[in-house]
Amino acid sequence: MAASTPLMSTYYPAPVAFSHGDGVWLYDTDGKRYLDALSGIAVNTLGHNHPRLTAALHEQVSRIIHTSNLFENPLAKQLAQKLVDLSGMTNVFFCNSGLEANEAAIKIARLYGHNKGIAEPEIVVYEKAFHGRSLATLSATGNAKVQKGFEPLVTGFVRTGLNDIADLRRIAAERPNVVAVFLEAIQGEGGINPASIEYLREARRLCDERGWLLMIDEVQCGTGRTGKWFAHQWAGIKPDVMPLAKGLGSGIPVGAVVAHGVAAETFKPGNHGTTFGGNLLAMRAGLTTIDVMEADGLLERAADVGEHLRAGLQSALGGLDGFVEIRGRGLMIGIELARPCGELVGQCLEDGLVLNVTADTVVRLLPPLIYTRDHADQLMGILVPRIRALLSKPAPA
């Protein structure tokens, strides 16, 4: 039987098509309005149709969109300098997505290892991690469902559990070929699982002791989402390699690898590249996103509204049988329930709320950083009754 759509069957899309957006609101092709609590999976930092972003993109499109990396790129230099200033790191490689940024990080670690004379370098990765779907990044990912059918996986990865510093020390003692530790500051797809401040600090210390690179994937949790520019900054540390993407372009595809120290000097001309990396439209989007965030105090807003939202959800759900816990920072929040809750996605769509469920049992909230407390209250007004109704039903056998 012929497929009903010319698109490959790689997704199960909800039966809703959005025609336009305005601020924190989305509108479908029938004119129905939805409160956006997903922001394109942590992408639409400034919400929808932000006047400064749309004006900047229109102006850039009218001038020039792409030239290639064979020529000087002033916009890329400006955005790189912004990221260096915000992170305290030293230089940047631009690409097109989080997957590409993570792939580049893996290549930096391997080349770093080879430069040290290690023929088969290994990278420590984590259970429940998600780094992408290329062969290397899905091999680094800690999800058997993502990996199934694509074996043999890429070798050179050693897996451990998040926040288990004793096991990381065991690996240090037993695996002389390890050259890097690669983790998300907050696991997104894995269920909004934060690396503890203590673990991040201990991992930094151990990497310094062993001469390893500390590579922190900030693709989903970076660019202000947690109330700091980058989630690892809550621990007061600095990684050697930091992949970014998603929210950096507020909807325009962009990825970046920010590096520091020896990692910043590992790639030489010819070691890595990409046709579209540093695309002028993407660079303009990144610069405008950061400028608006600074001008409008969106880091402080993410921290304040996120705390308001977590406190309200905890108060409304904390005593319910079947509620496990709320995790996350800023406007990156996971509500874990003691049962699968995927049905909430469709129910909330019916009620005019866009959200997501990940890891089967975790409601994931990733609102635009322009949210206010009033928007958070509207979100809770829709979501809390739906969760209460779900948990009031008999648990599935």
Image (cartoon, rainbow, N blue to C red):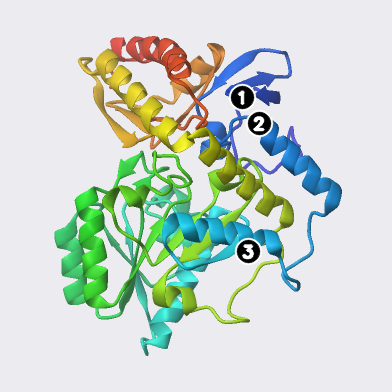
Kind of residue indicated by mark 3: Lys
Kind of residue indicated by mark 1: Gly
Which of these two is toward me, 326 or 71?
71
Residue under label 2, please give it: 50
At 43% from the left edge and 64% from the top edge, which residue is drawn? 89
Kind of residue indicated by mark 2: His
| Circles 1 and 2: CB atoms closer than 8 Å | yes
Query: Can you give x and y, in whole percent of width and height, for residue 157 in the image?
Result: 36, 68
Local SS, label 3: helix
At 51% from the left edge and 57% from the top edge, which residue is drawn? 83
Q: Residue furthest front?
A: 295
Mark 3 vs mark 2, CA separation in Å: 24 Å
Query: Can you give x and y, in whole percent of width and height, for residue 137 in the image?
Result: 48, 60
Residue 5, can we see it? yes
**Pointer 1: residues within 10 angstroms few (<14), some, or many (20+)?**
some
Query: Can you give x and y, in whole percent of width and height, for residue 75 in the image?
Result: 68, 58
Mark 3 vs mark 1, CA separation in Å: 29 Å
Q: Quadrant of residue 216?
A: bottom left
Which of these two is toward me, 348 or 19?
19
Q: Residue furthest bottom?
A: 117
Which of these two is toward me, 39 or 335?
39
Q: Residue furthest right?
A: 62
At 36% from the left edge and 9% from the top edge, which residue is drawn? 389
Residue under label 3, please give it: 77
- Asked if residue 150 lies left or right of residue 282, the reply is left
**Pointer 3: residues within 10 angstroms few (<14), some, or many (20+)?**
some
Residue under label 1, please give it: 23
